């Protein structure tokens, strides 16, 4: 079978965001926002170097201090953070790129040492995840969470809304709501972590409610055409599990589709960063339920990416780790150049090395 890979290098749109090509940089946690969870000037260099991606999805960024779950990840809730992010979006736009911010609340995937004094992680239910996080002491078991009270949910949604506004003030072209990988919104979606008996738990309708309300609030605040969502229907990371993900995620996508003009859905197929076939799942059944743009992710190469776009299974393919070690990934894919290998030692934390010193070709 011959596939015309030129399709990857054609322009497209996701909502109001015009992309020069079909290759996105997936959000990648790098743990270098210090001090005070503020991105540094190195981040402007890092994202600027990668601006030839059709779309950069900036690393997961907490919407509030309680939304943090790892050491030195950035926020978008303080004035200093907004100012710092503006230098990054300026660097990307100066090079003709587009960049959205991933809005993140980790829920129960956190540790008390990362949270404001006296706080514990919040979750749909007081069930500790069988998972670890990265703190000042290295990898540690996550802390036991408390269940969010029903009365706390409006303020949580308000935090997402304000974070989205802050992202636009910081010059982002839009946002991606992180509803994947076992973090707070995903914890509400799945019956493994959501044992609530109120309007946010139990039935699929109730478990998809927080997702729907958060994305509706963000879309209302900044416009649906600048709003996307990331889902990971069958990933097991961070102790995520559900007894029946197919109908759950079909309904989740239907509800997102009911928000007129939503820009995109971004789906991690299989286990995040791993096996694409860990559990059977019909992704086409999700795609068929959504009228907006579709980003697919996880383990694609040039041939499989082109095949997916050609078949209409996705509009854009997101590449994660290859973008860390190949700032010019788009050009390398286009010319079939070899890809540089990633140094896993410099993935999380540290400074310039392994961050802004991967050279482009030539
Ligand atoms: C790797 C390490 C820390 C966080 C995700 C935000 O999985 C993450 C993440 C990934 O979505």
Image (tube, grey):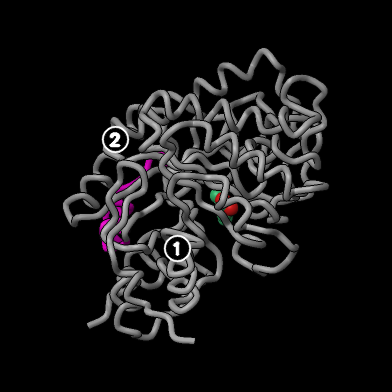
Disc 2 on helix, strand or loop? Answer: loop
Residue at left 52%, top 45%? 290
Q: Which residue is denoted by mark 1 in the rendering?
A: 317
Q: Is residue 137 visible?
A: no
The crowd level at tag 2 (other Cα within 10 Å; few <14, some 14-19, many 20+) is: many
Farthest top residue in view: 151
Residue at left 37%, top 79%? 4
* Mark number displayed over residue 225: none
Query: Mark 1 or mark 2: which comes first in sequence?
Result: 2
**Circle count:** 2
* Quadrant, the C terminus: bottom left
Residue at left 41%, top 40%? 175
Residue 129 occupies quadrant: top right
| Magenta span | 34-53
Residue 80 position, x and y percent, is 33, 31
Q: Which residue is denoted by mark 2 in the rendering?
A: 170
């Amino acid at each position: 079978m011959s596939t015309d890979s030129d399709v990857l290098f054609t322009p497209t749109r996701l909502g109001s965001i015009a992309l020069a090509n079909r290759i996105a940089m997936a959000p990648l946690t790098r743990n270098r926002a210090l001090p005070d969870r503020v991105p540094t000037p190195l981040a402007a260099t890092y994202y600027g170097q990668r601006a030839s991606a059709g779309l950069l999805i900036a690393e997961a960024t907490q919407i509030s201090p309680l939304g943090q779950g790892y050491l030195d990840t950035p926020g978008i809730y303080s004035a200093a953070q907004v100012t710092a992010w503006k230098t990054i979006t300026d660097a990307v736009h100066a090079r003709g790129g587009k960049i959205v911010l991933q809005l993140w609340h980790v829920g129960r995937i956190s540790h008390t040492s990362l949270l404001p004094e006296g706080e514990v992680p919040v979750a749909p239910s007081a069930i500790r995840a069988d998972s670890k996080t990265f703190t000042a002491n290295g990898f540690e078991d996550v802390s036991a969470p408390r269940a969010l009270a029903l009365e706390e949910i409006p303020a949580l949604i308000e935090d997402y809304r304000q974070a989205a506004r802050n992202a636009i003030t910081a010059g982002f072209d839009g946002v991606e709501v992180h509803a994947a990988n076992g973090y707070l919104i995903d914890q509400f979606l799945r019956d493994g972590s959501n044992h609530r008996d109120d309007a946010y738990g139990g039935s699929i309708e109730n478990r998809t409610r927080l997702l729907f309300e958060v994305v509706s609030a963000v879309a209302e605040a900044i416009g649906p055409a600048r709003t996307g969502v990331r889902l990971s229907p069958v990933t097991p990371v961070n102790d995520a599990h559900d007894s029946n993900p197919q109908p759950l995620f079909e309904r989740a996508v239907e509800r997102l589709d009911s928000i007129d003009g939503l820009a995109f859905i971004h789906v991690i197929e299989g286990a995040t960063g791993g096996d694409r076939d860990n559990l059977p799942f019909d992704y086409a059944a999700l795609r068929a339920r959504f009228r907006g743009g579709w980003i697919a992710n996880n383990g694609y190469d040039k041939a499989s990416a082109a095949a997916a776009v050609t078949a209409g299974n996705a509009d854009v393919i997101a590449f994660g780790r290859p973008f860390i070690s190949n700032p010019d990934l788009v050009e390398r894919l286009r010319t079939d150049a070899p890809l540089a290998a990633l140094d896993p030692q410099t993935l999380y934390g540290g400074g310039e090395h392994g961050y802004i010193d991967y050279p482009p070709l030539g």
